[in-house]
Image (cartoon, rainbow, N blue to C red):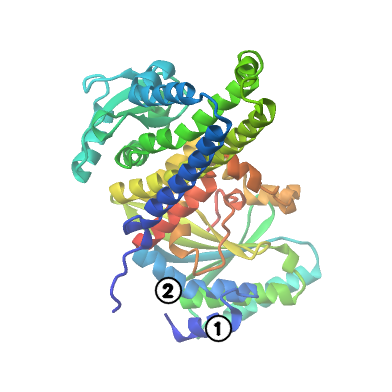
Amino acid sequence: MSFFRKLRKSTNNNKPRTDSDAIFSLSSAYITLETKLGLKSTGRSALSLKSAEGMHFTEMKEGIQRFLDISKPDIELKNRMVVDSYGYLWLVLEGKSMADILAGISAIGDTVEERGFSRQLLVAIFEFKIEKHSNEVTQYLIYNYKFNKFYPFVPFGQKTRSTEDEMKIMAAIVDEVPFEKDMTLWYPLWDLPI
Amino acid sequence: MSIPKTPSWQRRDAGLTARIILSFSILALLYIGFLSALAYVGLDFVSITVIAAIMILAQWYFSDKIVLWSSGAKKVTREQFPELHDIIERVVARNNLPKPKIAVINTNMPNAFATGKGPRSSVVVVTTGLMDLLDTEELEGVLSHELTHIRNRDVLILTLASLFSTVAWYLMQFGFYGGMGYGYGYRDRNNNGAGAMIIVLVVAMLTWVISFLIIRAISRYREFAADRGSAQMTGKPVKLANALMKISGNMRQIPTKDLRQVEGLNAFFIVPAISGSTIGNLFSTHPPIEKRIQKLMEMEASMG
């Protein structure tokens, strides 16, 4: 366990108060996912928020883009913006290290909140892969900004999901990150644009 | 490096033994109190008790046949259900258990149970609905749960536990109905007839109610014990958890509707209804599925 995790545990009683705290709890949990379940981060992640009209929203988008450009030397992230059929804006990040990804996602989340659009925030998602019978299976960890909790999402075939794999993810990291234990709130996100 | 700890669920189940001893002590005390009350009244209860005890023992002795007959289960051979036989043979061979007889009920309702006098003469019953619903590993989890019931002699334990409550039940019946006609003439010879009869009734009722609650508590605890046994046998608690989700229909509670759609409908902030009152829990023989799944997933997590 890292020094910082211990520190956070003692000051926050293991209950992160902000979204950034919650997201940074993944910095150790993703190792647990790899050692316990063999899940590897693909380096792809995304933050999604409801798109809005108007100058302020456009300014915020420009602000995020500027931040990503400026921080290029420090955090190595490829990025793009996509709007899906539901009208949600997706900021897709791709990086080599989990630390960079988490820094990017939480910084974008903070920017959105600072500009007064926190109510628009939907989720942050993190993509993982696992080798299963020489096939690669994609699994997701979703962070819900409304409930400030993580939950698993493993799509499986046509609009069905593998509850078993999802429960395994919960069992592995339920004590490490703020986790949604109520399965009726594990809403899927089909056809992710990442 | 730390020394790997044995998770608590893999250790011997001391709690189970303690609880059974405690429960039986309470039941025995109740029984003794009940008998003393009867003796005090001077009722000829011997015949009733003997008959009740014989009926219960007969019920236990013929339990497998009664259950098979009343549920419409048919014993099946290896030729008829090779996969079912294979799974059970695998589990019993790995865990050094005698192979039970296997029976199948032809119904869509997914269910399984075990019955029989002892490990050697037991029957594991599954429905065709269960076999259709579950995959091999999930089925193995459920069958291991039933095999644990057999190994722990749960049928015998619950039969013995219900002995007291059944005897009390018969006496209550006797007090209500028999006590009015035939009972009066009998009791007129002792001077304290009616008052004593009321005492017997009250004690019988109390015995019945308390033993009823204890039986349900034992039964719930043994369900957890069987889940744990299954997890030990298969090493895959998540498979049993998944099977329980499927059987209980909880699978449908995991949403398939897209989050972005739900957000739009604003159905997001509905407070979930308060679930499971404590009184309800007192009366049920099975613990809530959510509790069982939660415990199974704790086992899964501790396996690393």
Horizontal arrangement in the rendering, residue B51 relative to residue B77 (left or right): right
- For label 1, the residue is A10
Q: Quadrant of the C terminus of chain B?
A: bottom left
Residue A186: percent from left, percent from top: 58, 52
Amino acid on which the number 1 mark rests in the picture: Ser
> Which quadrant of the view contains residue B301?
bottom left
- For label 2, the residue is A96
Is B222 drawn above or below residue B12 in the view shown? above
Residue B219: percent from left, percent from top: 47, 41
Residue at 48% over, 48% down: B292
Disc 1: CA contacts within 10 A as few (<14), some (14-19) or many (>=20): few
Circle 1 SS class: helix
Horizontal arrangement in the rendering, residue B3 relative to residue A191 (left or right): left
Residue A89: percent from left, percent from top: 66, 61
Residue A37 seen in this snapshot: no
Q: CA distance from mark 1 to mark 2?
A: 30 Å
Residue at 46% over, 54% down: B295
Residue A92: percent from left, percent from top: 56, 65
Residue at 40% over, 54% down: B18
